[in-house]
Image: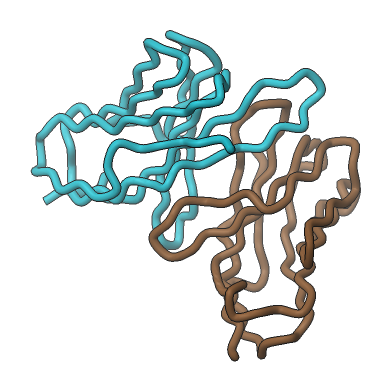
Chain colours: A cyan, B brown
Amino acid sequence: DVKVTQSSRYLVKRTGEKVFLECVQDMDHENMFWYRQDPGLGLRLIYFSYDVKMKEKGDIPEGYSVSREKKERFSLILESASTNQTSMYLCASTPWIAGGGETQYFGPGTRLLVL
Amino acid sequence: KQEVTQIPAALSVPEGENLVLNCSFTDSAIYNLQWFRQDPGKGLTSLLLIQSSQREQTSGRLNASLDKSSGRSTLYIAASQPGDSATYLCAGTETSGSRLTFGEGTQLTVNP
C-alpha cells in the first residue's frame, strides 16, 4: 500500500515562528501537493511539485514556501506564522502516468494552531 | 478556472437506504474525477477514480459515474450502513497528474 506520512498530527506555534511541515511518500511518486482545509472553504492548493527541486504555486501560496530536495520528501514552510494560517494541512502524492489514471494519495493531515 | 460543487451539503438517512451524492463541475474538459471519504479530523481516503476515458467505476457497494457533457458526477451508495457516516468529497483534475480541484463535500450521517 502507498503510504504518505506527515511529521506531526498536531502542532501549536506562536505568531512569527518559522514552521516546517514535512511530508514523505514511499512509492517513488513524481508529483506531490500541499493543501490546506478550512471550514466553508474546502481544500485549497498551496504548492505542488512535479520533480525534485521543482515547485509551482497553487491558489494560495502567499506566506508559504516549499522545498523538495529529495523525491520522497516535500516540505511546507511557513516563513513567519500568522493566526490566519491556523488550519488543517494535507499532503498528497501521485505518480505521473502517461495517459492518466493516477490516484492521489493523502497523508493523515497536520492540524496547526498558531497563537 | 474549474469550479466543483457538491449537493447536498449534508444528508441524514436511515440505515439500509440507497443514496446518491451529486457533484457538478463547470469545465467539461475535466480529465479524471476522484471521490474521497474523510472521517472527522483525518486525511482523505480515495474511494473511486474515474479516468478520462471511462464513464463509471464500481467498488463494493459504491458506484460512481461521470458525464462530462453535462458536467456531473454521482456517487451511489447501496444499502447504507452507520460506518458509511463521513464527509464525501469529489475532485477533478484538468490534465494527467495535475492538481485536484475539490468540492466542499457532502456530510453523510447514516442512522442505525
Q: Where residue B61 sits: x, y (%)?
A: 78, 67
Which residue is located at x 77 percent, y 63 percent? Answer: B62
Which residue is located at x 50 percent, y 36 percent? Answer: A3
Q: Where residue A42 sits: x, y (%)?
A: 49, 54
Q: Is residue B86 above or below residue B2?
A: below
Apparent side of residue B70 relative to residue A69 in the rendered image (left or right): right
Question: What is the quadrant of residue A67 in the picture?
Answer: top left
In the picture, which quadrant includes the C terminus of chain B? bottom right
Q: Where residue B72 sits: x, y (%)?
A: 81, 56
Apparent side of residue A61 relative to residue B21 in the rendered image (left or right): left
Q: Is residue A77 above or below residue A1?
A: above
Q: Is residue A6 above or below residue A50?
A: below
Looking at the rendered structure, the number of numbered marks drawn on it comes to 0
Q: Is residue B92 above or below residue A95?
A: below
Question: What is the quadrant of residue B105 in the picture?
Answer: bottom right
In the picture, which quadrant includes the N terminus of chain B? top right
| Viewer-closest of B43 and B7 | B43
Apparent side of residue A110 relative to residue A1 in the rendered image (left or right): left
Q: Where residue B49 sits: x, y (%)?
A: 74, 45
Which residue is located at x 35 percent, y 22 percent? Answer: A66
Which residue is located at x 28 percent, y 31 percent? Answer: A63
| Viewer-closest of A6 and B60 | B60
In this view, the residue farthest toward the front is A1
